[in-house]
Amino acid sequence: MEHLSEILNSLGENREQYYNAVSPVIAQTTNFSFATVAEMRQSLQTEFEQPFYTRGFNPTVAILREKIAALENTEDALVCSSGSAAVAIAVIGNVKAGDHIICVHKPYSWTTKLLNNLLARFNVTSTFIDGSDISNFEKALQPNTKMVFIESPNSMTFEVQDIRAVAAFAKRNNLISVIDNSYSSPLFQQPATMGIDLIVHSATKYLNGHSDVVAGVICGSKNHIQQLFANDWMTLGPSISPHDAWLLIRGLRTLELRANQSANSAEMIVSALENHPKIEKMLWPFSNHNPQLDLAKSQMSKCAGMFSIAIKTEDIKGVERFCDALKHFLIACSWGSYESLVFPVCGLATTPSYNNPHLPWNLVRVYIGLEHADLLLADLKQALERV
């Protein structure tokens, strides 16, 4: 594998082809022309790897594909217009009517909707399981099971699965294995090296890191990626624009710096707040109180900069007072960029009686951005006093 610095700063850029431009050229075009009919025919036949129409192949997007694949230690990658598009293409491209999918509890909400709402309309069934015990995968297996989908850790309560064991289970049973690796980013976890077939990301998060591009990626073997491209990808057309691809390339330049600072700051803040009297529970994969700590550390080289806290309060108003009192955190969804965020579950509630056993009303997700850790810790502490 190439050195991380080489991937982020030069891999795939071929500057000599583009006037030695330091920043990659943006091929902001929909169409490509040809000198002869024979050239056009040849390009159309190899659209996966040559320019014909930007929905299929674009030179700027191709640079990004090469970088992302190298980061995930896979042979190839596709870049989509959103993370949910990446999940949808990876799943839809590998199932048909009558198939069955095993999925862990509490994946990304739009993954749940894909399985329960869209695919169910076409007679694709799904079983949601507690993925902390590998035996639950075995129990959920059916004769028509085609895929296993995991999210380790997930991005709200941060449960992890034994990735190596899940990959081995999938291979034993001839299943496609898919993981959403958005939380860790390729910097801190590489599922392909543990046997997973397809890795998806919301590239909106750490990979872009600047809150200005919505994107997703699918990484896997050349064979898997070509199959997705030739069928569902080209039919559904979830391509990213060349300019957004350029912004993502720019964002990747600082991935290592951003992700490490976020992770280091989060570690300090979690340690300082774990026993705070106004916090009922701290959820973070590398927390000393996490029963899955050893498993998390065996799969992740470092823990990313997002955690959840359950506020010790009697009602939603206490959670609202905490969030509203913060001065250096924005109240917003998403994460992985430069700004620090809080995302209160009670913000999803449509009535005061909101109750979800998987996501309790007093849970607040906290993303640590690039502001100084001392500043953020002081802000969280003063807001907790308002509870």
Image: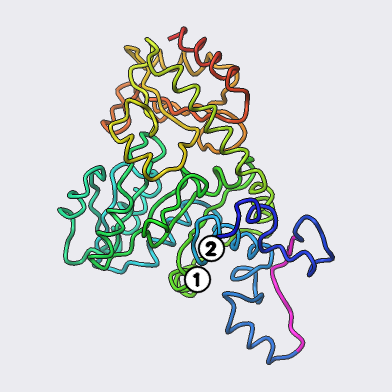
- The image quarter containing residue 167 is bottom left
Farthest top residue? 385
Q: Residue 282: within the magenta?
A: no
Q: Residue 229: which numbered mark, if any? A: 1
**Residue at position x 66%, y 68% from top?**
58
In this picture, is 96 found above or below 254?
Answer: below
In this picture, is 225 found above or below 151?
Answer: below
Q: Which residues are magenta?
A: 26-35
Q: Position of residue 106 (x, y in %)?
A: 32, 41
Residue at mark 2: 78
Q: Secondary structure at mark 2?
A: strand
Left or right: 371 in relation to 89: right
**Residue at position x 33%, y 41% from top?**
160
Foreground pick, 353 / 90: 90
Q: Is the C-beta separation of discs 2 and 1 under 8 Å? A: yes
Q: How is the image coloured?
A: rainbow
Task: Please state, as top left, top right, bottom left or bottom right, where the C terminus lies in the image.
Answer: top left
In this picture, is 17 found above or below 151?
Answer: below
**Residue at position x 38%, y 64% from top?**
92
Q: Residue 29: within the magenta?
A: yes
Q: CA distance from mark 2 to mark 1?
A: 8 Å
Q: Position of residue 48 (x, y in %)?
A: 57, 75
Q: Position of residue 19 (x, y in %)?
A: 84, 66
Task: Please state, as top left, top right, bottom left or bottom right, where the N terminus lies in the image.
Answer: bottom right
Crowding near the residue tagged with mark 1, few <14, some 14–19, many ≥20 C-alpha atoms within 10 Å: many
Q: Main secondary structure of the magenta part?
A: loop
Foreground pick, 199 / 110: 199
Left or right: 280 in relation to 217: left
- The image quarter containing residue 61 is bottom right
